[in-house]
Amino acid sequence: MRALLSVWDKTGLEELARGLAGLGVDLVASGGTASALAAAGIAHRDVAEVTGFPEMLDGRVKTLHPAIHGAILADRSRPEHLATLAEHGIIPIDLVVCNLYPFRSNPSIELIDVGGPTMVRAAAKNHAHVGVLTSPTQYGEVLAELAASGSLSDATRHRLARAAFAHTAAYDAEIVAWLDGGGVLGPTPDEAERELPPTIHLTLERAEVTRYGENPHQVGARYRVAGTHPWWDGVTQHAGTALSYLNLFDADAAWRLVHEMASDAPDRASVAIIKHANAAGAAYGDDLGAAYDAALAADPLSAFGGVVALAGDVDDDLAARVAAGPQADVIIARSFSPGATETLRARRKATRLLAAPAPEPLGRAIRTVGDTALVQSPDELLADPAGWSRATTRTPSASEMRDLILAWRVCARTTSNAIVVVRDGVTVGVGAGQQSRVVAARIALDKAGERARGAAAASDAFFPFADGLESLASAGVSAVAQPGGSVRDAEVVAAAEAAGIAMVMTGERHFRH
């Protein structure tokens, strides 16, 4: 049996090589792999001995030779292939161990591997006879199987071949993404071409399987773009049952919102309670306990079974406070003290406790619709409140402006049509996901009740008619933020003037579907 070793990542290489040698496998190695084996005192043949040619072109050509690829690609079930090998003195290669240059770490022409992918693909194509290892995580199981049976099973070779093709596909996708950014020539001046290239090549690797999908009869999993480590990879679950698809979806929405709130008001503590990806309550406070109480009081009925996001560390006292509140499906925070974990685990056995790092910025958004994908740039809050234009005679007061900023922030992360009412740093009314903007306003005001008097409100898109604004005015809302841009803006502004409302135009819409 002969094995060809040519790896960039040397993790586990020495153990694998010694294990193979101990099983009587003849080792062939190239370049840096051969040097590593020599340094470890492991007997092997250099690729140059097999091919009769030295490495050339600064190492660009090492393994691209019939003595290598004929040895990998020969179909052992075809006598004519075996005869050809014998005619040219080529010894078959039964195992290829190869992982590729880490292109993502430092994209460059020199890290575009040619020989590696060629060997991997050749071995994977001929997996009926050849095993191919592309990750150190595979070494142990393969050594164990070889030690136990002397060869690899059809099922193992099939599984390894699939992983190999996924490995080269991900590698090629990284190169395409680099070229979309300009490659060695630098970024393309066409911004649209960078955001929406002619093709998008994503390789997704399964990170975890969820309890079920959106509903119990569906299966679900979390995938990540191959080679990346999104913030979810850094999450530690301290308690509770396994996460479901919606737990992940809603916790992501909650964690991102509460971090955006914290960036808007770094001197305040921030808490968001999310239900079905929309805020049931979001609030600022002097500390996390006060912020939690305020967010919960905003809509305690909707908070049941939701996600509680706390932008900070949960200590024993805060845990007792949260445990006394409604059942939460997920509590996510920066960390939990040992006492907090025990308190919440004892009183909320099913609740998932997630300690999480800060989320990374959103990237290109891709949504599938059957076999169609809708692609867009991320929805970022671009307009600085300092640049909002005043539409009415009255200017918002400092406190109204703070509430308008929170209302606008939450509104942008709420399913359209959306109206959000905020008073004293707390969302007292959220109307989400309505076909009619005026109905969204009524829902928000119904939740707010008397708390709407003197409150600020935001609308994720312009008021098409004055009726939505008039509903807010009749409830006592004193300041409103909206994008503007309706043909009836003048009517809406006139209604605000008549009611003494301070209105600002943000200049940007935030529909969310």
Image: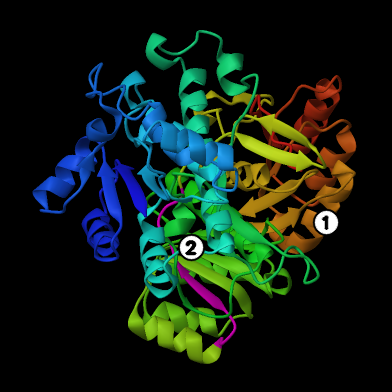
Dominant secondary structure of the residues highlighted in magenta in the image: loop
Residue that label 2 marks: 152
- Magenta stretch encompasses residue 357: yes
Q: Quadrant of the C terminus?
A: top right
Tell me the residue that label 1 is attached to: 443
- Residue drawn at x 89%, y 39% as measured from the top left: 467
Q: Quadrant of residue 105?
A: top left
**What x and y, as percent, mark residue 125?**
57, 41
Which residue lies at the image location 31% right of the left edge and 43% below the top edge? 7
Q: Earlier in the sequence, mark 2 or mark 1?
A: 2
Q: Secondary structure at mark 2?
A: loop
From mark 2 to mark 1, how far is it between C-alphas?
Answer: 64 Å
| Residue drawn at x 41%, y 63% as measured from the top left | 142
Indicate yes or no whether the magenta region holds residue 104.
no
How far across and down, in percent of the image, does residue 500 sit? 73, 36
Q: Is there any visible trace of residue 33 in the rendered image?
A: yes
Q: Is residue 493 above or below residue 25?
A: above
**Residue range corresponding to the magenta coloring:** 348-359
Residue 411 lies, in percent from the top left, at 67, 45
